Image: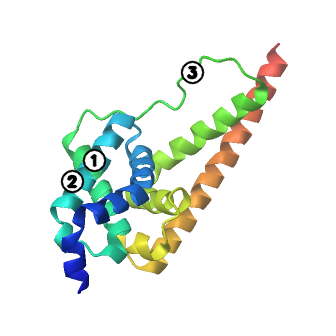
Amino acid sequence: MTEASDRESAPLADFAGIYAAHARDLRRFALYLAGDADLADDLVSEAFVRAWTAWERVELPTVRAYLFTIVRNLFLHHVRDERRHEPLDPRAPDGRPGPEERASDQSDLAVVLSALGALPEIDRAALLMRADEQVSYEEISAALSITVTAAKVKVHRARLKLAEARLAGRGQARAGRGTHEHHT
């Protein structure tokens, strides 16, 4: 039997395996892109619907990159359509009191998320695919239509920008505490 006839004989089983292998990573990626759980769920669902409807054209070795590309393109389409899109406020209060370490961690997170949001979309997508989803540089390059070298450079530079933002945020927090302590 050929690979094509094998796929035709059990498309549902193949697709269920693809879904089981990639749905969680795709949702996490979509959530990082969108910042909204409902939108992330919609993006992932639509990506799998589109993959299912084009199943005969999907190449199994590149299905992961194909799915990430669909999610990314759906997100970009959503952003273009939604002129009223508002980013999440990273300073939203947690509501639970905690020790100073938790406050410091939240401050670091807010700075990093802000810096992440300020990155160009392609850099953010490359970084998220690599850092959170463990996507290979080859898959990133295919998903973003860039060279493998460019994917590596984008991930490296994005990491440097986030690290610089985190260090700068810590410096500002220390300066703010020092100023506050002198006034009390």
Point out residue 133 in the picture as x, y percentages from the top left corner. 50, 58
Question: Which is nearer the eye, 161 or 28?
Answer: 28
Q: Which of disc 2 and disc 3 is earlier in sequence?
A: 2
Q: Which mark is residue 93?
A: 3
Q: Earlier in the sequence, mark 3 or mark 1?
A: 1
Which colour style is shown? rainbow
Between 23 and 183, which is closer to the camera in this rendering? 23
> How far across and down, in percent of the image, does residue 125 sit?
42, 58
Look at mark 1 in the image and give the residue it sits on.
45
**Label 1 near label 2: C-beta < 8 Å?**
yes
Whether 88 is drawn above or below 65: the answer is: above
Question: Please, is residue 57 above or below residue 95 in the view?
Answer: below
Between disc 3 and disc 1, the foreground one is 1
Position of 181 with respect to 89 (left or right) is: right
SS for callout 3: loop
User: CA–CA distance between discs 3 and 2?
Assistant: 37 Å
Q: CA distance from mark 3 to mark 1?
A: 31 Å
Q: Amino acid at mark 3?
A: Pro
Neighbours of disc 3 within 10 Å: few (<14), some (14-19), many (20+) = few
Quadrant of the frame with the C terminus:
top right
Q: Quadrant of residue 50?
A: bottom left
Q: Residue at x 53, y 63 (%)?
A: 134
Q: Tag 2: residue type?
A: Val
| Quarter residue 66 falls in | bottom left
Q: Residue 89 vs residue 167: left or right?
A: left
Residue pointed to by mark 2 = 49
Horizontal side, residue 18 vs residue 113: left or right:
left
Which residue sits at x=70%, y=28%? Answer: 103
Neighbor class of circle 1 (other Cα within 10 Å; few <14, some 14-19, many 20+) is: some
Rendering coords of residue 23 (x, y %) = 39, 53
| C-beta proximity under 8 Å, tags 3 and 2 | no
Question: Which residue ends up furthest to the bottom in the rendered image?
Answer: 1
